[in-house]
């Protein structure tokens, strides 16, 4: 029984490592839902719930479209002036309609 469990674990771990190569742990693949791109001085990618990340480059391989998320800062988009700000920081745009 123990031997069977071990071989099952070995099979499982090898199956998992085949799906997610350890080297590319920063690779973040985009589903069609997340692929809401805005081009400013980089690509803004919508991660959902008005959380965005900006990246300079987007890549593509057989697995789909991805970018490298090596600690990219999360930003939010102001619904009034459409500018991006760090998460937790209020809109800093003096001309913004949402202020005042
Ligand atoms: Zn604003």
Image (cartoon, rainbow, N blue to C red):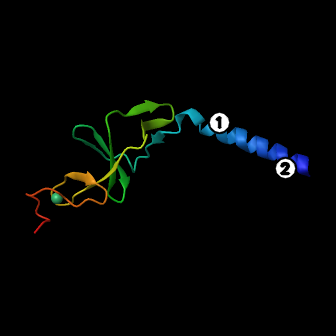
Residue at point 13% right, 66% down?
A: 99
Image coords of residue 1 (percent x, y): 92, 52
For the C terminus, the quadrant is bottom left
User: Dot 1, crowdedness within 10 Å: few (<14), some or many (≥20)?
Assistant: few
60 up-or-down from 84: above or below = above
Image coords of residue 30 (percent x, y): 43, 44
Find disc 2 in the rendering and name its residue.
Answer: 5
Disc 1 to disc 2, how far (Cα)?
A: 20 Å
Find disc 1 in the rendering and name its residue.
Answer: 18
User: Can you tell me whether the CB of the residue at mark 2 lies under 8 Å from the nearest atom of ligand 1?
Assistant: no
In the picture as drawn, the residue positioned furthest to the right comes out as 1
49 up-or-down from 13: above or below = below
Q: Would you identify the image quadrant in which residue 76 lies? A: bottom left
Residue at point 10% right, 63% down?
A: 97
Image coords of residue 68 (percent x, y): 43, 37
Apparent side of residue 56 relative to residue 62 in the rendered image (left or right): left
Label 1–label 2 contact, CB within 8 A? no
Quadrant of ligand 1 in image: bottom left
Q: Nearer the viewer, residue 10 or 86?
A: 86
Q: Nearer the viewer, residue 30 or 90?
A: 90
Q: Nearer the viewer, residue 42 or 37?
A: 42
Apparent side of residue 62 relative to residue 89 in the rendered image (left or right): right
Secondary structure at badge 1 equals helix
Residue at point 35% right, 47% down?
A: 73
Q: How many numbered marks does the figure carry?
A: 2
Image coords of residue 7 (percent x, y): 83, 43
Apparent side of residue 53 relative to residue 4 in the rendered image (left or right): left
């Amino acid at each position: 029984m123990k031997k069977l469990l071990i071989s099952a674990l070995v099979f499982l771990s090898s199956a998992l490592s085949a799906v997610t190569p350890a080297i590319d742990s920063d690779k973040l693949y985009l589903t069609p839902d997340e692929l809401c791109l805005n081009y400013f001085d980089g690509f803004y990618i919508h991660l959902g719930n008005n959380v965005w990340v900006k990246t300079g480059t987007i890549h593509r391989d057989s697995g789909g479209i991805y970018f490298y998320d090596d600690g990219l800062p999360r930003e939010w988009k102001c619904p009034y002036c459409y500018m991006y700000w760090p998460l937790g920081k209020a809109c800093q745009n003096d001309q913004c309609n949402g202020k005042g």
